[in-house]
Image (spheres, rainbow, N blue to C red):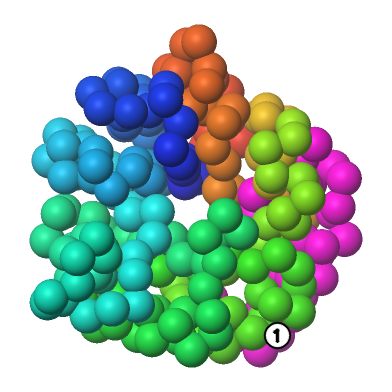
Amino acid sequence: MIINFKAYGEAAGRRALDIAKAAERVARELGVNIAVAPGHLELALVAQSVEIPVYAQGADAESPGARTAHVAVDNVKEAGASGLILNHSEAPLRLNDLAGLIARARGVGLDVVACAPDPRTSLAAAALGPHAVAVEPPELIGTGRAVSRYKPEAIVETVELVRRHFPEVAVITGAGIESGEDVDAALRLGTKGVLLASAAVKAKDHYAKILELAKPLAGR
């Protein structure tokens, strides 16, 4: 499970650390893999403070150097990230930039999750060599209408296509994931995990909500 903090106020500053610590506690208690993706400003703080994987929410195509206001892949790695989310629907990339970023990220040892809106685009993203693709229909993101319930066919087709052509690339899913039942449904449809945000970040009790969301992952 990857928890994307986005730019939510609930995950700004040291509040990001509170969520990351809750995720770390759940990961240890259940023996499951949970990664967190704080904003760039909180990335180093979180990476230095927890032992679970910490992903960056994105990076720019530019290489390190005289690049004011850009975030290079190498800088993300130096900040302590172990992975990178690319091409989220809220931060889409041109195909050539996505290909270059995946290659550069893998070259410095980062795990790469490439997001895509549908099965065919997921297949194209898988061809670029990420470690995983996350199929997320953008019309369901942040709606509370889980893809595993409202567009299960998108998950099934993506799993079938990617498994047939690029079996080394894992398929996860996201968009509207709100409950443990949503996570369980996604897993039963063939995915290896989920990418989610508001359900965990905006919860009043981060530990309790992340525990609920992660329980279906235990023992799989």
164 left or right of 48 in image: right
Give the number of marks.
Answer: 1
Q: Which residues are magenta?
A: 145-174
Q: Residue at x 59, y 28 (%)?
A: 199
Q: Is residue 39 above or below residue 89?
A: above
- Pick the residue in front: 199 or 210: 199
Image position, residue 204 (x, y; %): 50, 10
Report which quarter residue 11 is drawn in. Answer: top left
The answer to whether any part of residue 145 appears in the image is yes
Q: Residue at x 54, y 80 (%)?
A: 94
Image position, residue 48 (x, y; %): 12, 40
Q: Is residue 69 above or below residue 10?
A: below
Dominant SS of magenta comes to helix
Q: Secondary structure at mark 1?
A: helix
Report which quarter residue 178 is drawn in. Answer: top right
Q: Residue at x 66, y 74 (%)?
A: 122
Image position, residue 22 (x, y; %): 35, 23
- Residue 186, magenta (yes or no): no
The answer to whether any part of residue 217 appears in the image is no
- Residue 160, magenta (yes or no): yes
Q: Residue at x 70, y 85 (%)?
A: 164
Q: Give the residue type that dot 1 points to.
A: Arg
Q: What residue is pinned by disc 1?
A: 164
Image position, residue 206 (x, y; %): 45, 18
Mark 1 closeness class: few <14, some 14–19, many ≥20 residues within 10 Å: few
